[in-house]
Image (spheres, rainbow, N blue to C red):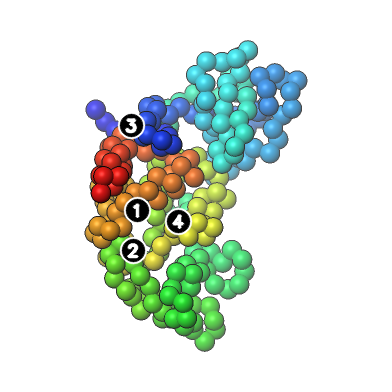
Amino acid sequence: MTARRVLVCLLLGLACSVHAQILEVKKDAVIYEEPDRRSRPLHDVELTDDLGIYIVRLLETKTTKGYYKVKLRGREKSGWIYKSYVRRIESDQHPKKVAYKRTLYRHWIDEDKNKINTRDEVLIRDARSGTVKMDENGRKVISGQWLDPYTGQIFSDPRELDIDHFVPLKNAHESGGWTWSAKRKQLYANYLDDSLHLLPVKKSENASKSDRGPDEYLPPRKAYQCDYVATWIRIKQDWELEMTESETQAVKDIRKSCAGS
């Protein structure tokens, strides 16, 4: 059987639902607080402007008074939308027009306008205290000391390091990121509020990892593998990303072995 996308629902055990279903919503649709057009409309729903559509996740397969109950991406609240304003599809059956392209995820930006881009912000943040040296303009890191958590090696030349998206861009895109707006894609590609979201790692190791999940790749440093899987699960939950069946099974097996060690 081919791997299907399943929702990450790793709260206590690792039971996950199969057939993640979504609704493709028309631009002129209104999402309400209650299944009634007289209830308050939710006007602040973010559009996925790069696709010309927006996507909500179906919470209940049956309608109530003709309305679907939906989960809004990146939001705690749910809402209700009338059935004539949506097209119901499975997330792994969406048209190929949303195929992954790295350029969809604008990265290494200077978000805070301090003339230091995201890559160098990560290098500064993760270097051993007092070791960072900047270029004469104070914009680019030229040396420091970094521990690569994947290999356990120490590096002093930033040119030997890549900044790894812990859940790689392509993996994130194919497991739900394709529904995001351009703004949210850029946020994901440059996210600094989680210190494990972006990590400096050895270039060749980052290439070995590529866009693979824990079912196909684990860091060679065995002491880090349990933490690696725990972080993978958390980031997938935080960003409402899905997992394949093989990915879910691998994570389940690794967590079990970690608990027994």
Mark 3 and mark 1 lie on one chain; the one further toward the N terminus is: 3
Please, what is the three-letter code of the amino acid marked with disc 2? Pro
In the picture of the structure, the residue carrying the numbered disc 2 is 149
In this rendering, the answer to whether 51 lies above or below 160 is above
Q: Which numbered disc, 3 or 4, marks the residue that appears first in the sequence?
A: 3
Judge the density around disc 1: few (<14), some (14-19), many (≥20) Cα neighbours within 10 Å: some
The disc labelled 4 sits on which kind of residue? His
**Labelled pair 3, 1 in contact (Cβ < 8 Å):** no
Q: Earlier in the sequence, mark 2 or mark 3?
A: 3
Circles 1 and 2 in contact, beta carbons < 8 Å: yes
Look at the numbered disc 3 and give the secondary structure of its residue. loop
Circle 2 sits in a helix, a strand or a loop, which is it? loop
**Residue at image mark 3:** 4
**First-in-chain label (4 vs 1):** 4
Give the secondary structure at mark 4: loop
Residue 133: percent from left, percent from top: 46, 83
Whether residues under marks 2 and 3 lie with C-beta atoms below 8 angstroms apart, the answer is no
Residue type at tag 3? Arg
Location of the N terminus by quadrant is top left
- Label 2 CA crowd tier, 10 Å (few <14, some 14–19, many 20+): some
Q: Image point 45% across, 27% down: which residue? A: 21
State how far apart marks 3 and 4 are (Cα): 25 Å
Which callout, 1 or 2, points at the residue further toward the start of the chain?
A: 2
**Distance from the alpha carbon under mark 2 to that under mark 3:** 31 Å
Foreground: disc 4 or disc 1: 1
Residue 54 in view: no
Query: Neighbour class for label 3 at 10 Å: few (<14), some, many (≥20)?
Result: some
- Asked if disc 3 and disc 4 are in contact, CB closer than 8 Å, the reply is no
